[in-house]
Amino acid sequence: MSATYTNTITQRRKAAKVNNKQPQQQWAASDFSGEANERLHFRSRSTNSKATTTHPFAKNSPSPLCCNGALTLLNCCVDVNCHLNAPLRGSVSRHTTPTPTPTATPTPTPTATPKQSSPSPNSDRSRSLSPTPSRSRSLSCHKRKQKSSISAGGVAVEEERETANTSSPPFTVNLKIDLFSWALFLLAFGTRFYKLATPPHIVFDELHYGKYISMYLHNIFFFDQHPPLGKQLIAGLVNLAGYGGNYTFTQIGEPYSADLPIFWFRFVPAMCGSLLAPSVYKLLLEAKLSRWSSALGGLLVVLDNSLLTQSRFVLMESMLLLATTLGITFLLRFQRCRLGSLQWFVSGAAAAVFLGAAGTIKYIGYLALGLGFYLLCRRLWQLLYDASLTDRQLWMHAISRLLIFVGIPIAVYIGVFYVHFKTLYRAGPHDSIMTSAFQASLEGGLASITQGQPVAVVHGSQITLRHTHGRTCWLHSHAAVYPVRYPDKRGSSHQQQVTCYSFKDVNNWWLVKRPKKENLVVGDKPDVIRHGDIIQLVHGITSRALNSHDVAGAMTPQCQEVSCYIDYEIKMAGELLWRVEILNRQSTGNKWHAIKSEVRLIHVTTGAALKFSGRQLPDWGFNQHEVVADREKSVQPDTIWNVEEHRYTQTEDHRERERQLLTAEMIPTHRTRISFWAKLMELQSKMLFHTKSLSSHMFSSMPHEWPLMDKGIAYWLDSESSAQIYLLGNILIWYTATTGIVVYAALLAFYAVRRQRLCFDISEQEWQRFLVAGDTFFVGYLIHYLPFFFVDRTLFLHNYLPAFVFKLLLLCYVIEHLDYLLRRFCTGRGVHIVRVYRLMLIVWLVCVLSIFSKFIPLSYGTSKMTTKQVRSLRWKDSWDFILHKNHNLH
C-alpha cells in the first residue's frame, strides 16, 4: 500500500472524528457542502487505480452491487441485507428534503484522491464513485435545484403549515364499513325474519316463556330455574307493542289470539340470531384469522339449521349465544390493549357486561365467564415473564382484571334481579314454593298474616307449621292410623298418622301447649314461648299430642316414627315433649315469632329432630309425605320449620274451637316487608338446589349423542298436515366441525411433542395463532360441553348449541391452518395440492348450502309436507320425525 494512499486514509479518518463532534445541524448542512460519505466511499469496488475526483454528491451514489444494479440518486437500495439502509450521517431521506441551518458551516474535505502506484483492494470502490460526464451534469443540475429549494424551504414550510391549518376541519369523523360484516348480517336477517309470525301457534317452550312474559306485564310473581334477563327484554318490547298480557298459554300447538303481537314476541330472539353471524365474524378476526376464514365462520352460522330454528321463536339460546360471542370478542381485544388506556377500559367493561349478561339469561352462560377467567389467568401468567414490568404494574394488571371481571358481572346480575323483584310484587301460583316470609311480602298472597295475626307464639297459640326449605308442605295429621305391619313384615306402633301435606287444610292446625298447663285460652298476659322452652303440640281437630318413640319409620327405617299419641292401655306411655330451638335468633331474638323464626323441634326423650323425609307414603297414607324424627345432631334443611298462620285460642270449649278452625278466614290487609338481599338469597337457593326436572321425555338426549346429532327435538306439528318444526342442525357442518375438533387435538399433541424435541414445523407467528385458537375455541368447547356429563337432569339437543358455536369457530381456524401447512410444504409441483384443497372447500360449501336448503322446511314449518317427503328427510334412524295423528316413523 503506497504512502499516499495511507495518508489519504488517515486524513479521512481524522475528518470523520471531527465530524462526529459536530452538532446534528452541522451534519445536515454538510449534505450540501460536498462532504464525502466515508462509509459509502469504502464500499466501491473499482479495480482501476486511477485517482478520481470526489464529486460533492458522490456520497449519495450507491454501490451497484448493494443496490442490485439499480442506480438511484438520493437513497440506497431496499435490500434488507445492505447495511447502507441504516441512517447515515449526512444522508438524504427519500421522502423529505432537509432544511439547512443558517449557523451550520460545512467542513472542508479533500476533493481529489491521488493516483495509486499499485492496485489495491479498494481501487474498485474508488472507481465506482467516479461520475460519468452525463451523470456529472445531472448531479450539478440537481445541486443547483437543491440550493434554490433550500433558499425557499423555510417559506414553503410555513406556507404549507398555514394551508394545512386553514384547510383541515377542527373535528373529523372517519366512517369505515365492513362489507363482509354487513353482508352476513343481511343474510342472517333475511333467513331469521322470513315469515317470522309463522306458524301462529305456540311452539315448544314458547308455552313457558310466554306465561312468564304475561306475568311480567301483570306484575305477578313466578318461579323459573333460569335468570330473567331474556324474559325481561321480550316483556319490555311487547309491552311497548301494546300487549297487555291477557293471553293464556295452555298447550303446545294452540293458536295465538288475533290481538297477540307474534312478530314482536319473536323479534328479540330473531334479531339476536341475525347479529350472531357478524359477531362470530368479528370474533374470528380478533383471534387473528384472515378475513376470508372469518367470513366463512359467519356464513356457517347463517347456514346451520339448528341456529336458524332456535332464533325464530321465543327461546333464550340466541340471546345467550350473542352475549357469549360478543363477550369473548371484547375480551380478546382487551388483552391486547395498553393498561389504563381508554380502549382498554371500554373493551374490558364491554366484555364483562356481555359475559355477565350471558349468565343472567341462562346459568349456562357463566361457563363463558369461566372461559374468560381462564384467558385472563393465562395472560397474567405470561406477563410474569415480562422483565420490563415492575411488581407494581403486575399487581395493577391483576387487581384491575379482578375488579372488572368480578365486579361488573355481579353488578349486572344483581341489577337484573332488582328489576325482577320490583316488577313482580304480586302473589301468584308459583309463590307457594317460597318461604312464608317471602310470600308475606307479596301483595295479595300471605300479606295478611303479619298484620292480621299475632307475632309472638305463646301458650295457647293455634299455628300451622310449614316445612321452610325444599318442598312446600305443612305438618299434618288425621284420624287414620299406621298399619299394624308394613309390606316388609315390620310392625308399627299403630298410632295416628303424622304427615306433611302440600295443600291448605284444616288438619294442618296445631295448638301450642305448656306441659303443666291445661287451660289453652290466651289471657291478657300471654305466656311467650322462647328458645329452649319445652312444649307440647296438640292436633287441633283430633286433640291428640305429637309423639315420637323408638319405632322405625314407615318409609325411612333408620329414623324414628312420628305419630299422634293414642292411649291403647298397653303400657306404652306417650313421649310428647319437644324442645324449641330458634336457629335465626340473632336476627329475630329469643322469642318464637310467626313467619320469620326458623325453628327445630327436638324430641326431649330421644334427642331426635322433627324431619321431612321427602318420601311419599303409599295409599294407606293417602300418598302424602312422610315425617320422621332424625337423631342426627347437625342442622339439616329438612328439619327446619316455621309458623305460617297463627291465631290465639279464645275459648276452652273444644267444639267451639273446632268450629272456629273450620270457619276462620284471614282477611288480606297489607303486605309485610322483607329486604331485597333476603329475597335474592332465598330465590337463588331455590333456583340452584330445588329446581324441578322432568323424569323423562321422548325427545331428550344424552351428551354423547350431541356431536353427531343422533337425536333432534320436535317443536311443532301442523294439525292438518305433516308440516312440522324439528330442531336439527346442518349435518355436514356438525360432522365436519366434530372432525375439526379431532384434527386440532391431534395437531396440538404433534406440535407439542415436536417442539419439545426442538423441531419447529411452523413459524412462531402461526404457533401463537394456534395457541390463541386453542385457548379461545378448543378450551371454550370443552368448558361448554364436558359439564353436561355430570348434570343429573333431563337434557335436550339445544343445550349443546353454546359448545357447537365454539366448535364451529375452531373449524374455521383448522381450515385456515391446513391451508397454511399445504402452502408451506407443498412447493413446486405440489402447489396443485393447495389448489385441489381450496376446490374441495368450495365443493364442501356448496354441499352445506344444498343440505341447508333441503332441511329448511323443518326450520320454518310453512311447507305442507307429505308423508313421503318427511320420510325422505330421515337420514338417521334415531331422528324421530312426527307424522300426522302423532304416529312415529318406523
Image: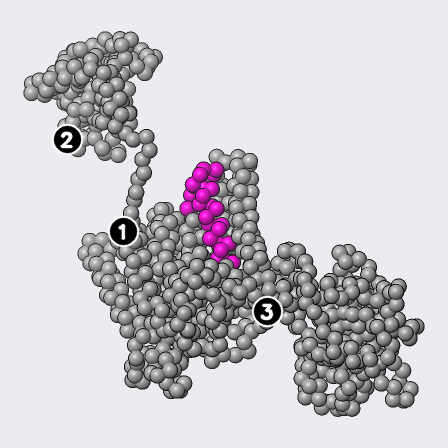
Q: Quadrant of the N terminus?
A: top left
Amino acid type at mark 2: Ala
Please state if 16 lies on the left or on the right of 339 as rendered: left
- The prevailing secondary structure element of the residues shown in magenta is helix
Along the line of sight, which residue is nearer the eye, 483 or 500?
Answer: 500
Residue pointed to by mark 2:
70
* Residue 294, numbered label: none
Residue to which mark 3 is pinned: 428
Q: Residue 220: in sight, yes or no?
A: yes
User: Could you tell me which residue is drawn at 32 percent across and 60 percent down?
Assistant: 189
Q: Which residues are magenta?
A: 333-361
Residue position for label 1 = 179
- Is 54 left, or right, of 523 in this rendering? left
Residue 241 on image: x %, y %: 41, 61
Q: Are marks 1 and 3 in contact (CB under 8 Å)?
A: no
Q: Please state the horizontal and vertical placement of residue 809, each as a whole percent of the image.
A: 37, 58
With 183 as the anchor, is 265 left or right in this view? right
Real-space Cα distance between discs 1 and 3?
50 Å
